[in-house]
Image: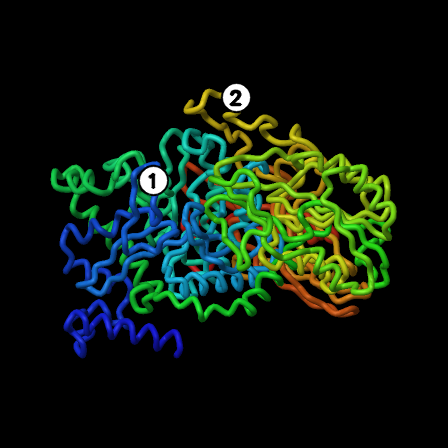
């Protein structure tokens, strides 16, 4: 039976139960799919009681919390993130919400965890610079969510990496607004292709986890508009997301979930967002102020101090402190998103046996392969030869699995945790290794070789094993999670281990499984380094395929790797050393100079620059042309594979005003993902979004492109320009809500 027929059967059954079988749209005119989502929301809203409207705007956690004496609603999908009751008499289903990002997540307190496919981390998918990979991965996890009985996924993390120590860097899309917004937007669009709602989160400036409930993010409007907010704007445009999740932190003195400037002026008035705003779990601090500012759904009770949109909102509406019109508006936005995304027309029913785990394994493996970044390959050590006889694999639990990130996005794999019992076992843990063994995958690549594993706890023994081998492969790992931030150093004695192995064997490869950048004091001692990030439930196979050349590395860094913390805008993480519970401010004085823009503006030499990544072949660019077509800047160039292998290239277009005047020397304005056979070539044409050429005029509330000469550059990364053209652009002004085609 097809999903469409199952949905039709479920709807028919509901009609029979309610005694309206055969009348359909006559009894429930809002069930007419030919009407617009707004019309359908208006029709059903007129039939709703005040209590039913209020039911839509208040959500509960879906898992028991004994410490809070909280029992989840019986109708919730136990072990999941949230539940909002439906209205059966009107044919409106509940909202069953799952945490997400890389897959269908289960809360750690649930006694029976869902076992689902996990994609690589968000930053790994972004490192592919391939929107189709992001969309395909989103479609896959969205399908697993639907078949697991969920119709809302709390995915879509687009917060920029202002600080690489952020414990959730692994969930997000890096440091550039165009790249992050494009990749996360396509990911969300893929999820929503399954007739479910996804969020874009965490709105806004949730750029560190330390003190996330206490900190006040201070930034000027122009700096925010040209960086973090632009990333959200791109993501929302590319996804048509049904919802936006507001963040824990304050922004310029006001909590994000009661910030009128963010939720109404920017999101609604400027961008024209038509979905609904829901809170992060525990991010609400008021009833009236939140409702009036633009919050539509208070989510995840009992994480807030009070059920603000429960009895307090009911009382506020009854007393006129929150108008009935505002309650109608909140309910309408939620209903509109439900109709617009097919949540009502295609009701979900758990059908776990229909999940095609084999097909989904191919999706996540391909994403891991395209997202891994080859950082170093001196002497062309990689790809490894199939003729190797002795291989020493060291550290990182590589004998049994690959690392995943922690927190609410944790997706539990089929086969369980490969390394159970690691601390922390409870929130923000547990630490989970997916049972995809790199050692077994490596052995399968070279069945005639002796592949030995050493856990790396004794550096001297590991060095001895490396000395006896033809090649040594060291796995360096760093676990990161929601609610904590992490230093840039590998934990334990891994740096010393890598140095010892490299000294013992000049043919040493380091494979990193990290949530973001790490420092590498041993970088010049190691000929080959592969950043695999958190590679998902097929990560072991993907790593082996890359090491042995079955797949040509094509990932590029979506985030700058610094040489040390002194190169960061804030070498010391804000909030550290304060008494617990003390509010504090973070001054984002760098404004729009995030990541590579900061490094470029301050003439800092990074360890590895934004956009960087090596391959086993060689690509060259020529025939660069830049000109104005109508009002848009259009760039074209040729990419040619001059090397011996088939491979995927990521040409990057950067722009800058010839006379300076921007916050940094250059900005990313476009990119492509191009796969070519040896000797093959392809012309690439990109239309540049004018907002990447503009500055924000706060007084006029508009984008402004200054008249003059602009350099258009194509290169392999932000510090490697191959060709440059100069183009003259006229002055242009764009409204705050401008988007392509508007």
Marks 1, 2: nearer the viewer: 1
Rendered residue at 38%/43% (across/down) = 280
Q: What sort of colour scheme is used for the picture?
A: rainbow
**Can residue 495 be seen at all in this image of the molecule?**
yes
Please name the residue that numbered disc 2 is placed on: 577
- In this view, the residue farthest toward the left is 319
Q: Nearer the viewer, residue 599 or 199?
A: 199
Residue 122 pos. (x, y %): 55, 51
Relative side of 721 to 385, left or right: left
Q: Quadrant of the C terminus?
A: bottom left
Residue appearing at x 73%, y 68% in the figure: 681
Please give left or right for residue 214 compared with residue 89 in the image: right
x and y, in percent, of residue 585 in the image: 46, 26
Q: Percent position (x, y) of residue 398?
A: 68, 50
Number of numbered callouts drawn: 2
Residue 478 placement (x, y as % from top left): 63, 41
Q: Looking at the figure, which quarter contains the N terminus?
A: bottom left
Label 1 crowd (10 A; few <14 / some 14-19 / many >=20): few
SS label for mark 2: loop
Give the camera-side residue of 449 and 576: 449
The numbered disc on residue 66 is 1
> Dot 2: few (<14), some (14–19), or many (≥20) neighbours within 10 Å?
few
Sequence-wise, the earlier of marks 1 and 2 is 1
Q: Are marks 1 and 2 in contact (CB under 8 Å)?
A: no
Q: Is residue 308 above or below residue 334?
A: above
Taking the image as shown, residue 637 lies to the left or right of residue 499, namely: left
Can residue 294 be seen from the camera position used here?
Answer: no
Foreground residue among 28 and 357: 357
Q: Say what secondary structure mark 1 lies in.
A: helix
């Amino acid at each position: 039976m097809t999903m469409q027929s199952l949905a039709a059967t479920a709807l028919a059954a509901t009609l029979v139960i309610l005694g309206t079988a055969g009348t359909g749209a006559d009894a429930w005119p809002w069930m007419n799919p030919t009407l617009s989502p707004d019309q359908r929301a208006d029709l059903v809203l007129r039939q709703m009681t005040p209590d039913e409207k209020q039911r839509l705007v208040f959500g509960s956690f879906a898992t028991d919390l004994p410490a809070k004496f909280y029992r989840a609603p019986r109708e919730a999908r136990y072990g999941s993130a949230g539940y909002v009751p439906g209205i059966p008499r009107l044919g409106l289903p509940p909202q069953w919400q799952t945490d997400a990002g890389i897959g269908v997540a289960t809360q750690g307190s649930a006694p029976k965890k869902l076992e689902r496919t996990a994609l690589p981390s968000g930053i790994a998918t972004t490192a592919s610079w391939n929107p189709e990979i992001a969309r395909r991965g989103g479609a896959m996890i969205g399908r697993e969510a639907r078949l697991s009985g969920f119709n809302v996924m709390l995915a879509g993390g687009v917060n920029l990496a202002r600080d690489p120590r952020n414990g959730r860097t692994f969930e997000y899309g890096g440091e550039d607004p165009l790249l992050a917004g494009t990749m996360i937007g396509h990911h969300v669009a893929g999820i929503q292709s399954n007739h479910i709602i996804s969020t874009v989160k965490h709105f806004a400036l949730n750029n560190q986890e330390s003190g996330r409930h206490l900190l006040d993010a201070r930034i000027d409007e122009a700096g925010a508009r040209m960086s973090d907010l632009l990333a959200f704007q791109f993501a929302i445009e590319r996804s048509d997301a049904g919802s936006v999740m507001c963040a824990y932190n304050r922004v310029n003195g006001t909590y994000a979930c009661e910030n009128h400037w963010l939720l109404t002026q920017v999101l609604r008035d400027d961008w024209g967002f038509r979905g609904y705003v829901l809170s992060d779990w525990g991010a609400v601090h008021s009833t009236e102020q939140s409702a009036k500012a633009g919050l539509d759904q208070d989510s995840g009770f009992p994480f807030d101090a009070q059920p603000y949109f429960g009895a307090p909102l009911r009382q506020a509406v009854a007393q006129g402190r929150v108008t009935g019109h505002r309650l109608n508006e909140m309910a309408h936005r939620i209903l509109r998103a439900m109709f617009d995304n097919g949540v009502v027309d295609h009701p979900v029913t758990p059908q776990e046996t229909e999940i095609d785990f084999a097909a989904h394994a191919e999706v996540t493996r391909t994403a891991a392969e395209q997202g891994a970044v080859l950082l170093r390959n001196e002497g062309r050590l990689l790809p490894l030869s199939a003729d190797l006889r002795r291989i020493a694999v060291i550290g990182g639990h590589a004998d049994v699995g690959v690392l995943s990130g922690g927190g609410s996005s944790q997706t539990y794999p089929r086969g369980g945790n490969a390394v159970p019992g690691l601390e922390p076992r409870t929130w923000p843990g547990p630490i989970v290794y997916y049972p995809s063994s790199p050692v077994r995958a490596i052995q399968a690549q070279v069945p005639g070789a002796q592949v030995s594993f050493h856990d790396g706890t004794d550096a001297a023994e590991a060095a001895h094993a490396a000395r006896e081998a033809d090649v040594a492969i060291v796995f360096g790992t760093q676990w990161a999670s929601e609610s904590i931030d992490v230093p840039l150093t590998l934990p334990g004695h891994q740096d010393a281990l890598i140095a010892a192995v490299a000294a013992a064997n000049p043919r040493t490869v380091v494979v990193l499984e990290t949530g973001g950048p790490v420092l590498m004091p041993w970088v010049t001692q190691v000929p080959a380094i592969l950043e695999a990030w958190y590679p998902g439930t097929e990560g072991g196979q993907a790593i082996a395929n890359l090491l042995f050349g079955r797949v040509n590395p094509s990932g590029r860094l979506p985030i700058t790797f610094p040489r040390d913390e002194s190169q960061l805008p804030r070498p010391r993480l804000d909030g550290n050393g304060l008494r617990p519970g003390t509010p504090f401010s973070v001054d984002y004085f760098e404004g729009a100079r995030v990541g590579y823009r900061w490094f470029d503006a301050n003439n800092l030499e990074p360890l590895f620059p934004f956009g960087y990544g090596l391959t086993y072949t060689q690509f060259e660019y020529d025939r660069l042309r830049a000109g104005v077509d109508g009002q848009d800047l259009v760039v074209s160039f040729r990419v040619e594979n001059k090397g011996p292998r088939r491979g995927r290239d990521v040409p990057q277009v950067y722009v800058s005003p010839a006379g300076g005047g921007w916050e940094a020397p250059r900005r990313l304005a476009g990119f492509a993902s191009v796969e070519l056979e040896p000797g093959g070539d392809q012309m690439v044409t990109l239309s540049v979004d004018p907002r990447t050429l503009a500055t924000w005029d706060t007084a006029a509330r508009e984008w402004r492109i200054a008249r003059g000469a602009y350099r258009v550059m194509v290169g392999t990364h932000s510090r490697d320009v191959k060709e440059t053209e100069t183009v003259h652009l006229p002055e242009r002004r764009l409204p705050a809500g401008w988007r392509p085609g508007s």
